[in-house]
Amino acid sequence: MTSRTIMRLMVGFYILLFFGYLFGPLIMMGITAFNATSFPQVTPWEGFTTAWFVQLLEDDQMTDGLINSLWIGLGVVCLSVPIGLAAALMMTQIYERVRPYYYMVVVSPVLTPGVILGISTLVFWDRMGTAVNAEYESLFYNGMWLTIVGQSTFISAYCMLVFLARLARFDRTQEEAALDLGASHVQVFWKIMVPFLRPAIFSAAVLAFLTSFENYNTTVFTIQAESTLTTVLAGKVRMGTQPDLSALAVIIIAITLTGAILHEFLKQKERLKQIRQEKAAKEADQELAETMGL
Amino acid sequence: MSADVELDHLTIRFGDFTAVRDAHLKINGGEFFSFLGPSGCGKTTILRAISGFNDPTEGAVRIGGRDMLGIGPNKRQTALIFQNLALFPLMTVAENIAFGLEVRGVNKLNRRDKAMQLLDLIALKGQGDKLVSELSGGQRQRVAIARALAVEPQVLLLDEPLSALDLKLRQHMRTELREIQQRVGITFIYITHDQGEALTMSDRIAVMSAGRIQQVGDGSTIYDHPETAFVASFVGENNPLQGKVLSCDQEFAVLDCGIARMRARNPGGLEAGDEAYVFIRPENLKLSTKGDTAASADTPENSFTAPVVSEAFEGAVRLISIQGPSRKPIIASIPNTGEAQPFTPGLLLNVCFSADQAVALPLGDLADE
Ligand SMILES: Nc1ncnc2c1ncn2[C@@H]1O[C@H](COP(=O)(O)OP(=O)(O)OP(=O)(O)O)[C@@H](O)[C@H]1O
Ligand SMILES: [Mg+2]
């Protein structure tokens, strides 16, 4: 054996180890979802079954939590994306000298532990509710609402970062050109800014939804009597796991994979379109040169 | 309809920095007017003040006799073509052109008609549905012009619109721009640092340097009758010879320039004792070798003897560098007849020029090459 082949073997081994580390647990979990044993395990293999998926669907606690999670995710998207957008636009408008301080303030929720955000949201709304003598059924004590608000405190900062990155590439002369052609500031926002930000709005919404969906630290305090998928799961795991959790994991992985593949596919299409356009521009150049007899 | 534009002692400062200093001139309706000056001299700042993006620190901008103070860019009868064009990349060519009409609430059908009409004007018929990214540089250029013309402005402002194009296309677009201006008949205010562009297209030119307007006039006035040392050295090639004024008669002054006494026109009213430059263009210098009597027969007023430093061959002309009084050589250009013998370095030459073709101007900043 030459040193070259040894080297190759070692690299191969490392890659195997790396991917094993990344995907091993997921694959293992995927297999347990289909094993008939009543405890999540790969061996002994007692036969293929989809019973755990059925059990998962019939688990009311789980489906209720899931539905709550989806609603909260939607609420967070509706709240965080506009707030994040406003915060990012603000950043471009204020004096250059105060920008670092402003940035520090609006980004600080990202750096604050979720537990603290959860507790402080809870305390704040409770005090406010007491102060105005709100009823117990009111928004002040509503777990769903508090969770949306609590999560949005830091998720809107994430959204702002997404928007800031996009805005950094915005060409201010676009805005000026629109103004110069007679557009009002409102028209500039809707006709120039929003179309430019559209991809960022989409990314921010996806990011906000996913972050909300998987959040536990803040939610566990703000959700109170209600439950979300993460709090239900945490409760279940505390009592010992069952293969229906593996079934849930398989579903989530499948959705994620589909999403990723779809995203890649769309990106590829976009790339091809761009190449086509560049080619067209080059042809136009040539045509022009020919008609001018250069 | 075209409107006149008046800069009334316009000064614009950014903090402590004065970008435009006391600009005072009037641009007539329907005129093709250029601002010519080196990079950073404040051309864009003036244009942005006319279109409403910069406020005057002092003085005023008047369009059609009306003071524009407090009137936003979207309320002015001007359209600006940006240095980078600023076309909207997410819209088609037709949408770009019709944007100004769209924000004015013109309905879709009329917008489409107008866009078609303008596409015709800029020779891009049938290309309205393309995206901007599918167009060549010259085509984008014309879309920007059409987009600005669509709102029927009274004044069109152009900020170095040709600088991104390659040489051939630039020359082609010059004539095209001039044609469009004559067809639509509105005021064009054009900014450039390229004197060739300014001289070929404009009715009148304002030469700027460091925030100041140095001279306003038509192309030949600027070229033949510069009023400041900057204009003389910036527009076209010119040889400056520094000296002291010895005496003046009506139109001429005699200066002591070290190598010789020179007689030159004196438009600025220099007086005896003043320090000044004598400017003489390379094509106006006549060269003859010592003892060559044929050339010195018509005895122009000014002559001196100096050695050749080097010669550069430029095809149609030969550029001869001659040792002058300062470190920078004096350049003479003579037509290339294809038979004359080369000027070898060190060869002593008799250099002469007539007083009519030389001009004496007060000391001032020269344009750096
Ligand atoms: N908003 C601003 N704040 C501070 N300084 C500015 C601002 N705009 C322009 N300046 C300064 O004013 C001067 C003139 O700028 P301007 O853009 O008018 O030059 P220009 O003649 O158009 O140059 P170029 O040919 O390079 O475009 C420059 O020194 C520039 O740095
Ligand atoms: Mg400029």
Image: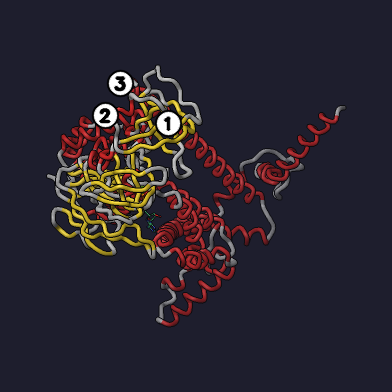
Query: Secondary structure beneath disc 2?
Result: loop
- Disc 3 is attached to a residue of which chain? A
Residues at circles 3 and 1 in contact by the CB criterion of under 8 Å: no
Query: Secondary structure beneath disc 1?
Result: strand
Tag shown at residue B349: 1
| Residue nearest the viewer, comparing A40 with A149 | A149
Q: Position of residue A63 (x, y in %)?
A: 52, 54
Residue B236's image quarter? Answer: top left
Camera-near label (1 vs 2) is: 1
Tag shown at residue A24: none
Amino acid at the residue labelled 3: Thr
Query: Secondary structure beneath disc 3?
Result: helix
Instruction: Quote the CA–CA distance across marks 1 and 2.
Output: 57 Å
| Residue nearest the viewer, comparing B364 with B88 | B364
Q: Position of residue A21 (x, y in %)?
A: 72, 45
Report which residue position mark 2 lands on: B124
Q: Is residue B62 left or right of residue B82?
A: left
- Disc 2 is attached to a residue of which chain? B
Neighbour class for label 1 at 10 Å: few (<14), some, many (≥20)? Answer: many
Q: Position of residue A181 (x, y in %)?
A: 25, 48
Report which residue position mark 3 lands on: A291
| Residue nearest the viewer, comparing A263 with B280 | B280
* Whether residue B87 is visible: no
| Residue nearest the viewer, comparing A50 with A193 | A193
